[in-house]
């Protein structure tokens, strides 16, 4: 079963929910898809055993064959190729690796070369296996790194994916294909506003979802009213407690120190399995 | 005209609440909300929209069913898995590259413009605001950020404003890069947690790469004194100015629930005091 943990607004407790759930369930593969700012490993002290570079393919122009006709640049929707009368230049940072420039080149002057944009890190913590992706600082495209992380999915495991914040491409790529998505929110106007956008995306993608309300007791009741009106299931509520915040700040998953939560997170995962029918 | 971007790496550290407070304190300033896929600033500043424009992010492939011979070449060449077995285009996956159009032997595919969001120029009690909304599931947030910044610049020049303050998005990827290129300085709002520190270090590297002067604000500093000290010594070793140290406070949430900035909601609170000091330090800094 593939369960992703996401939220529109950042800092609502995605990573915390993903980790505590992962620690409360057996046979888990935890994938950190927040490749811009991966944090899961900070909480698990995993033994890392392997690193693998992530590349995208970018066009390489053969100067002998190229006559700077400009067809490739005309085709490219991302302005990743710039042509002058003397030169055809590629800007790797803008390239989306669609492959079109090579298709339209009349002189077959374009081949592909690897462009490193990140790294995959493999580790274990107890019986839990962990893969986290890391986008190289200054590289703009997170999605290919997220795709590389998702290629590591072991479908016989209880797979948990920690999504990046936001509601656009990195989030969409992470939750694509999930059996279920846990949306973590907080009961504040910002939390609700961003939750609504996320819900709209998931409905379009036909990914089933439910909500975890974190830091209950702060803010207002509007998140609850919205969920009731939209018939969205609230799966779990986590109260605001200074102790949870302090444990988080030290990189300690709170269910390890507050064992009553281990049961709650394990029940959360069971409930999801029932909802999904797995 | 100076440009300042407020960033954090990690989400939820207080970027937007602090940017909104700056908007109240700053004179002669245009505010730009560049967190386009989860914009929240408008909930505190209540902009009145003066001008709205459609944002055409990328294009979308459309297959004409009657012409399509189902040969499969488009599916084979698409690198984004955007064409289904039934030859439907998955609009969320399609990046509008046009490869399918070139691959199609019977010209059954066209690329149509797609409206991916809206950009707004607005007025608030405190000045002009440039903002946007990326429609759910649309891509190209980086391009929309660039549009929001262009709009902000146009108003700032027209109104002869001294400054643009940009609210950035979490992370490090394209929208963040689009929100810092060419700015004079960035304020990184962090928190004294292991995640906060990890993400701060990566954002500082990014700012260094793009030659942007960094300032740091430690929000909720009293949640973990050891981590706060670690951030302070890290910044001091690296010559980075920590311009603000703000205590944990529920005032931010209360202000938000009331649709106000914390400066308006509780002007005398220690949080407001801290933000005012921070703003003065940034304005007086000789680094910018």
Image (cartoon, rainbow, N blue to C red):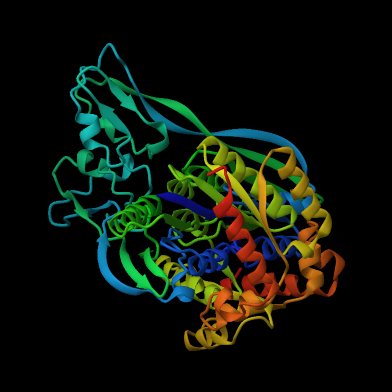
x and y percent of residue A218 in the render?
A: 66, 81
A112 in relation to B193, above or below: above
| Residue toward you, A218 or B266 | B266
The quadrant of the picture occupied by the N terminus of chain A is: bottom right
B280 in relation to A277, above or below: above
x and y percent of residue B185 in the render?
A: 52, 47
Using the rendered view, name the quadrant where residue B46 is placed.
Answer: bottom left
Residue pictured at 33% horizontal, 56% vertical? B160
x and y percent of residue B249 in the render?
A: 70, 73
Q: Is residue B267 left or right of residue B231?
A: left
x and y percent of residue B238 in the render?
A: 70, 38
The reply to whether residue A249 is visible in this rendering is yes
Residue pictured at 35% horizontal, 71% vertical? B123
A32 in relation to A209, above or below: above
Figure disc tally: 0
The quadrant of the picture occupied by the C terminus of chain A is: bottom right
Using the rendered view, name the quadrant where residue A15 is placed.
Answer: bottom right
A238 in relation to A2, above or below: below
Q: Is residue A18 left or right of residue B94?
A: right
Residue pictured at 53% horizontal, 61% vertical? A178
Q: Is residue A33 left or right of residue A89?
A: right
The reply to whether residue A188 is visible in this rendering is no
| Residue toward you, A260 or B169 | B169
Residue pictured at 20% horizontal, 17% vertical? A67
Q: Is residue A89 left or right of residue A44?
A: left
């Amino acid at each position: 079963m593939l369960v992703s943990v996401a939220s529109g607004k950042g800092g609502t407790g995605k990573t915390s929910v993903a980790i505590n759930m992962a620690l409360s369930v057996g046979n888990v593969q935890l994938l950190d898809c927040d490749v811009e700012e991966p944090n899961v490993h900070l909480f698990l002290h995993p033994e890392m055993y392997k690193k693998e570079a992530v590349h995208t393919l970018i066009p390489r122009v053969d100067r002998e064959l190229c006559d700077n006709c400009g067809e490739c640049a005309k085709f490219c929707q991302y302005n990743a190729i710039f042509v002058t009368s003397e030169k055809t230049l590629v800007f790797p940072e803008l390239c989306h690796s669609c492959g079109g420039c090579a298709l339209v080149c009349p002189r077959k002057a374009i081949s592909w070369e690897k462009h490193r944009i990140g790294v995959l890190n493999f580790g274990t913590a107890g019986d839990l296996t962990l893969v986290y992706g890391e986008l190289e600082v200054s590289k703009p495209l997170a999605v290919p790194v997220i795709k590389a992380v998702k290629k590591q999915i072991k479908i016989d495991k209880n797979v948990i994916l920690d999504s990046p914040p936001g509601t656009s491409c990195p989030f969409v790529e992470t939750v694509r294909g999930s059996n279920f998505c846990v949306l973590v929110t907080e009961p504040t106007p910002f939390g609700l506003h961003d939750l609504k956008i996320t819900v709209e995306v998931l409905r379009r993608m036909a990914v089933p979802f439910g909500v975890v309300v974190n830091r209950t007791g702060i803010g207002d009741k509007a998140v609850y009213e919205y969920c009731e009106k939209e018939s969205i299931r609230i799966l779990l509520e986590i109260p605001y407690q200074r102790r949870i915040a302090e444990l988080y700040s030290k990189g300690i998953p709170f269910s390890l120190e507050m064992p009553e939560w281990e049961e709650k997170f394990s029940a959360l995962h069971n409930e999801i399995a029932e909802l999904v029918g797995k | 005209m100076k440009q300042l971007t407020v960033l954090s790496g990690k989400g939820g550290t207080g970027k937007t609440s602090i940017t909104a407070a700056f908007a109240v304190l700053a004179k002669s300033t245009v505010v730009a909300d560049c967190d386009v896929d989860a914009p929240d600033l408008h909930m505190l500043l209540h902009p009145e929209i003066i001008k709205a424009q459609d944002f055409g992010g990328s294009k979308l492939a459309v297959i004409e069913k009657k012409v399509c011979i189902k040969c499969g070449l488009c599916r084979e060449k698409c690198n984004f898995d955007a064409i289904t077995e039934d030859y439907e285009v998955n609009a969320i996956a399609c990046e509008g590259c046009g490869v399918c159009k070139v691959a199609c032997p019977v010209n059954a595919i066209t690329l149509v413009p797609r409206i991916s969001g809206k950009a707004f120029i607005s007025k608030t009690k405190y000045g002009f605001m440039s903002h946007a909304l990326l429609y759910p599931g649309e891509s190209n947030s980086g391009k929309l950020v660039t549009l929001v910044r262009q709009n902000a610049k146009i108003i700032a020049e027209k109104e002869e404003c001294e400054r643009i303050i940009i609210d950035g998005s979490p992370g490090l990827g394209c929208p963040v890069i689009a929100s810092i290129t060419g700015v004079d300085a960035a304020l990184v709002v962090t928190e004294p947690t292991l995640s906060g520190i990890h993400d701060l270090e990566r954002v500082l590297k990014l700012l260094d790469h793009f030659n942007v002067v960094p300032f740091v604000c430690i929000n909720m500093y009293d949640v973990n004194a050891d981590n706060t000290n670690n951030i302070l010594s890290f910044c001091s070793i690296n010559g980075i100015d920590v311009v603000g140290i703000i205590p944990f406070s529920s005032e931010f949430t209360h202000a938000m629930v009331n649709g106000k900035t914390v400066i308006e909601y509780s002007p005398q609170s220690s949080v407001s005091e801290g933000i005012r000091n921070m703003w003065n330090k940034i304005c007086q800094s000789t680094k910018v």
